[in-house]
Image (cartoon, helix red, strand yellow):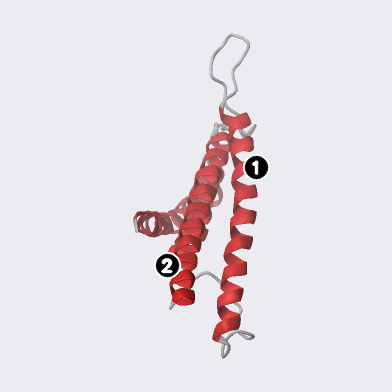
Amino acid sequence: MFLNRLALRLGRATAWCFGAIVLIMVYEVVARYAFNAPTTWAHETAILLASFGFVFGGAFCMAEGTHMRITLLIENRPRLARVSEALSLVAGILYLGGLTYAAWRMAERAVWRFSLSGAWDPERSGSTLNSPLPSYLKALLFIGCALFLAIVVQRTIVWFVAWFKDARA
């Protein structure tokens, strides 16, 4: 399915961000302590790269089927396992629906800001670099939550179709 493939590709691509974070932090440490020349961009860049990985990690795990599960109670009880899966999918939809809505509201306020002159003025970090990174991260959080929600909804539909077929048989 398209959403699963998209989440898997995004997850694998963003996994490389963590390697880049290591390189950036090594550069920052060497620049700061060996040359007494700290950077103004390393910290914010590392936050951005880590955010990519974390935001798409949930959708990646759900698409891959490796999302955390506690199987102690349902391991030998297939009927209980089906009920548990249905309840977890519905709870996931409710939670991710609320989170996606909240992320949209947060991103909307951070990205669609304009100064008195009418110029676009997204939320900024307030650091030395003062980048518009917070507004981009909030928009990214919305995209990641929406993708995760779409995958859970897709999985729920597949589950209920399979359940309906089993019930009719």
Q: Nearer the viewer, residue 133 or 155?
A: 155
Instruction: Name the spot of residue 83 as percent of width and height, x first.
Output: 60, 75
Residue position marked by numbered label 2 in the rendering? 64
Query: What's the residue type where badge 2 is placed?
Result: Glu
Instruction: Name the spot of residue 130 as percent of width and height, x first.
Output: 58, 30
Could you tell whether 33 is left or right of 6 in the image? Answer: right
Query: What's the residue type where badge 1 is placed?
Result: Ala
The residue depicted at 51 percent of the width and 45 percent of the height is: 48
Q: Is residue 160 above or below residue 145?
A: below
Proximity of marks 2 and 1: CB atoms separated by less than 8 Å: no
Q: Is residue 61 above or below residue 120?
A: below
Instruction: Name the spot of residue 131 as percent of width and height, x first.
Output: 55, 32
Residue projecting furthest to the top:
117
Which corner quadrant of the image does residue 115 belong to?
top right
- Determine the secondary structure under disc 1: helix
Q: Is residue 128 above or below residue 68?
A: above
The residue depicted at 49 percent of the width and 72 percent of the height is: 163
The residue depicted at 59 percent of the width and 8 percent of the height is: 117
User: If the image is split into quadrants, where does the C terminus sit?
Assistant: bottom left
Residue position marked by numbered label 1 in the rendering? 102
Which of the numbered marks, if any, corresponds to residue 85?
A: none
Visible residue check, residue 54:
yes
Q: Nearer the viewer, residue 159 or 49?
A: 159
The residue depicted at 62 percent of the width and 68 percent of the height is: 87
Upstream in sequence: badge 2 or badge 1? 2
* Disc 2 to disc 1, C-alpha distance: 26 Å
Instruction: Name the spot of residue 51 as percent of width and height, x first.
Output: 53, 50
Mark 2 crowdedness (10 Å alpha carbons): few <14, some 14-19, many ≥20: some
